Image (cartoon, rainbow, N blue to C red):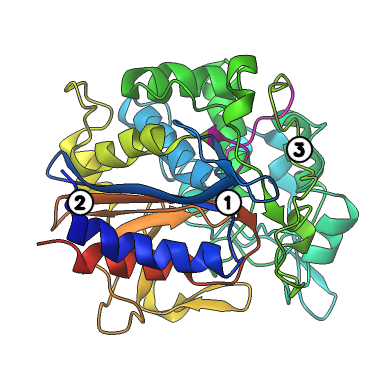
Amino acid sequence: MNTPNREHIIKSVADSYVERGLFSGIEWLAEKSGKTILSGKSGYQKFEDKTPIPENAIYRIYSMTKPITAVLALKLIEKGMLRLYDPVSAFIPSFSNLKVLNPVGTTEDIARPMNIEDLLTHRSGLTYDFLMGCHVAPLYSAQDISDDGSKNLKEKCEALSQLPLAYQPGTRFNYSVSLDVLARIIEVVSEEDFQKVLKKEIFDPLGMEDTGFGVKEENISKLMSTYGARNFKEIMNASPHSLIETNVNEHNPHNKSDTFQRGGTGLFSTTQDYLSFARMLLTGKSKNGEIILSRNMINYMKVNRIPDSQLPLMLGPLPFVGYGWNLIGRTVLDPGKTMSLTGKNEFGWAGAAATYFWVDPDEDLVGIIMTQYLGSMWPISDDLRVAMYQAIE
């Protein structure tokens, strides 16, 4: 249950972001030991019209799609359908001929095959076209890898197989389209469309009725307006921060999801739906007790897999000091090096439009932050997470 003092701490932080014109609408939710302890909203669904945030507002969650895809892969591992050491080329034959492009312009053969663990930990050698400083990123940009929603997963993977890797598999953490490749592998082993497998294995058991690659016709009025960059290529640009609604070039942005499916981005969700998923990461079970992942897999999943030689994690120019990466996302590795208050074993991830979630097993706590500004550099997730921690008794 919320208390006025607890809620005031959070709301004052969120209100300050809205009042300064930095974000249009912000929603937050925290659950401890199965009970909601913090929940609230600040701002508007559409800043220009001062439209109130609706109940069960729908957000583009971008890379918060990745942990969901990762959990689905872990379920298939538990079923014996995948293994971490399986080579990607066993499922996508065109990945057997990959080359690595060195920064000096020379190419070389891969030293070993890319595998499933590489995809889950972003050490595949793949990249994103928005990553400044990556020498292969311009090749992705020229092929419109991130923003072309017309290709299905099979077609996208075929296009990726024709491009060089930026690094040898396993040698470097480099945030990437790896989870899109993993989604295609899930299709191959399941012999079903990715979104159908997600619905059967994740969304239906967790009651995530409003999560998917499109928005149901009856729910379009609940879709939050999006601000900031117009597409993926622009999200690292230092453009002026403005609450002028963006005509987001988000592939099939409403209810046309027959083509666009990705493992690393593209899902729409609500705060409550994503809470159902995040809560499951504490125990492996849905709220009604259905097992999604075994207790042993949950424990196995949480362990950092990035060696010291590949730390700190870098997302373009941004370092994640004190963090490692487990099988679904970032995880606190050394709380003495983190630069913002958090739990010593906290893990989770974020989305490009400033959505964010974390799971703290020691506190039996999950937290969700939702807003819609693509490419914001303001530390809203840090500020709201800190406020939530100090509100915990």
Name the residue that disc number 2 marks. Answer: 365
Image position of 77 (left or right of 102): left
Q: How crowded is mark 3: few (under 14 residues within 10 Å), some or many (20 or more)?
A: some
Disc nearer the start of the sequence (2/3): 3
| Mark 3 secondary-structure assignment | helix
| Mark 1 secondary-structure assignment | loop
Q: In which quarter of the image is residue 60?
A: top right
Residue farthest right in this picture: 142
The residue type indicated by label 3 comes to Lys
Whether residue 6 appears in magenta in the rendering, the answer is: no
Name the residue that disc number 3 marks. Answer: 156
Disc nearer the start of the sequence (2/1): 1
Distance from Cα at disc 2 to Cα at disc 1 = 35 Å
The residue under the point 60% across, 18% down is 216
Q: What stretch is highlighted in magenta?
A: 259-268
Assess whether mark 3 and mark 1 are in contact (beta carbons under 8 angstroms): no
Magenta-drawn stretch, dominant element (helix, strand or loop): loop
Residue farthest left in this picture: 393
The residue under the point 80% across, 45% down is 247
The residue type indicated by label 2 comes to Leu
Name the residue that disc number 1 marks. Answer: 114
Whether residue 260 appears in magenta in the rendering, the answer is: yes
Which x, y percent locates residue 286?
A: 24, 27
